[in-house]
Amino acid sequence: MNDSIYQAWHRELGHAEYRLSITMEGYGADEDAAEAFLCGFEQEHPEVGAVISQNSAEDTITAIFSLSANSDLHALKLGAAIWVEAGVASGLVPKDVIRTETELVNGEREQAEHQSAVLA
């Protein structure tokens, strides 16, 4: 059985949970494109729990998903590979990426919040 890129990198390196948001220009009002993009994620990487949003005023489409990684840079690199694989599977013509955001969901921040709650 072949590991996906996500499974292989997670097994070797990832331990903290990150949320990524990658925004591409175009497709802001195309509901079929949003459905195709979501299907691409579900086909290639259902483990990341992708959600697709659109902004018709900016004419953008955004994929938001979670993954495990050992740093924000590692999360961005891994997320970009996952995003590309899902995009290829969607059949959409790629456009320029205009924004990326990487947020630590657990790990050090979660531990700090837990310690604060214990002290309160």
Image (spheres, helix red, strand yellow):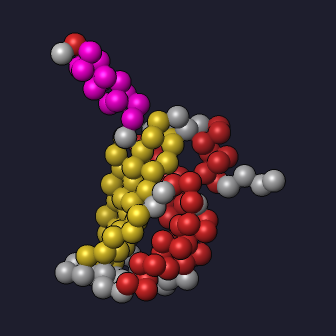
Does residue 21 belong to the magenta stretch? no
Q: Residue at x 62, y 45 (%)?
A: 9
Q: Is residue 46 left or right of residue 19?
A: right
Q: Residue at x 55, y 72 (%)?
A: 40
Q: Residue at x 55, y 38 (%)?
A: 14
Q: Is any atom of residue 85 visible in this view?
A: no
Residue 8 versus residue 107 in the image, above or below:
below
Does residue 107 belong to the magenta stretch? yes
Query: In the rendering, at what x and y percent does residue 80 appear?
Result: 49, 60
- 118 or 104: nearer the viewer: 118
Query: In the rendering, at what x and y percent does residue 75 appear?
Result: 47, 47
Residue extending farthest to the right is: 1
Task: Look at the magenta stretch and give its main secondary structure.
Answer: helix
Query: In the rendering, at what x and y percent does residue 115 appear?
Result: 29, 18
| Number of numbered discs overlaid on the protein picture | 0
Quadrant for the C terminus, please. top left
Q: Residue at x 43, y 83 (%)?
A: 33
Q: Is residue 43 left or right of residue 98?
A: right
Magenta stretch bounds:
106-118
Q: Is residue 50 left or right of residue 89?
A: left
- 102 or 56: nearer the viewer: 56
Q: Is any atom of residue 28 visible in this view?
A: yes
Residue 60 versus residue 108 in the image, above or below:
below
Displayed quadrant of residue 116 = top left
Displayed quadrant of residue 73 = top left
Query: In the rendering, at what x and y percent does residue 74 appear?
Result: 49, 45
- 10 or 97: nearer the viewer: 10
